Amino acid sequence: MKKAAILFLLACTLIFTTACLNKTDKDKTESLLNPSSNDISEDSTASSDELTKTVESFLADSSSSAPSSSSASSSTSKNLPGQPAPPKGSKAITLTFPEGFTLAQIGARLEAHNICKKADFIKSTQTYNFSYYPLVKAIPPSSKRAYKLEGYLYPDTYTMYTHMRPQDAAGKFLRNAEQHISGYSYSGMTTDQLVKLASVIERESNNSSDMKMVSSVFHNRLKKGQRLEADSTRDYCTHYLLKPNGPFSDSFKYYYNTYRCAALPAGPICNPGAAALNAAAHPASTDYLYFFTAKGKNYYQKTMAEHEKQLKKFGMG
């Protein structure tokens, strides 16, 4: 609507400008509505062309710098879920949610600052319809997936408001995820699979400089049909899924614990950041199939024999 109004105003300006340059009689006025008419002078044609170029330039700039139609309407609609007006009488609070935080950890931080209750936040991510976000819509439905939006609550610093609706708080993360996660891809993997892998890389790496090497190990294992056997997936089951710490039955250890399940876990085990997503999409080129961490450093091996030898060397075998 806004672009249509701008086009109308600029078209009127074009007609008016040309009219002023050719005002002699009624017949000349008709020529203003017919640019092919020979009655338009060279000067007026030049002025018309110049204004037309200005219009085209303006529209080109607008289309390149402005958000998409859906984003634009989102920014102007105060009631759109995910970006509403702040609650009346609320207080703005800036909160940072680090890479690797889980859904439960995010909920706990929100509750600690009176944004919303942790339980309500988690419930909203499970039951609220966020399918207008393409990333969310593309998540395949599965009864084996514990938390649908785990992995898609993009880590960043946000301005939250006290007493927000939980779905509005979740919407802030999802809007950000759309801008960051969608740009990553790896041949043969869906975006959701990439996010799952990135979440494991996030929790298995000591720092961002390790991530591409860790990624190479997991990619190599996946290509060979081997289990990932990542300790972080077992820990996720213990602390966030299985009773008594989590709400899910014991069967979920077969869906998430990569010592038990084949390939990737049923869902992401945390919310990965840009470095982990990039590592999942661009692993280092290696032949490594194993690694372990000792004294804050990762050690990589190509064979099980080499792996076990290194573990014994560090007193871990």
Image (cartoon, rainbow, N blue to C red):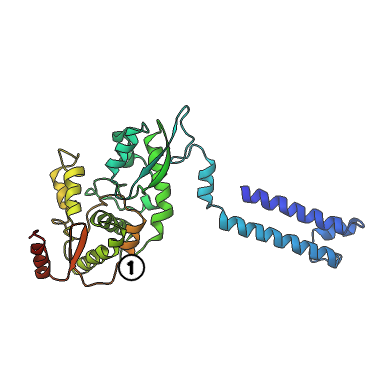
Circle 1 — which element?
Answer: loop
Relative vertical location of residue 1 with respect to residue 201 in this rendering, above or below: above
Q: Name the residue at 70% across, 51% down.
A: 8
Across and down, in percent, residue 293 comes to: 18, 59
Relative vertical location of residue 108 with respect to residue 56 in this rendering, above or below: above
| Whether residue 132 is visible | no
Q: Nearer the viewer, residue 147 or 238?
A: 238
Left or right for 244, reference 151: left
Left or right for 4, reference 259: right
Across and down, in percent, residue 49 comes to: 75, 64
**Label 1 Cα neighbours within 10 Å, binned few <14 / some 14-19 / many ≥20:** few
**Residue lying furthest top:** 89
Across and down, in percent, residue 59 comes to: 64, 57
Q: Name the residue at 39% across, 34% down.
A: 165
Quarter of the figure with residue 239: top left
| Whether residue 88 is visible | yes
Q: Name the residue at 18% across, 49% down.
A: 235
Residue position for label 1: 187
Three-letter residue code for mark 1: Ser
Across and down, in percent, residue 300 comes to: 19, 66
Left or right for 158, reference 66: left
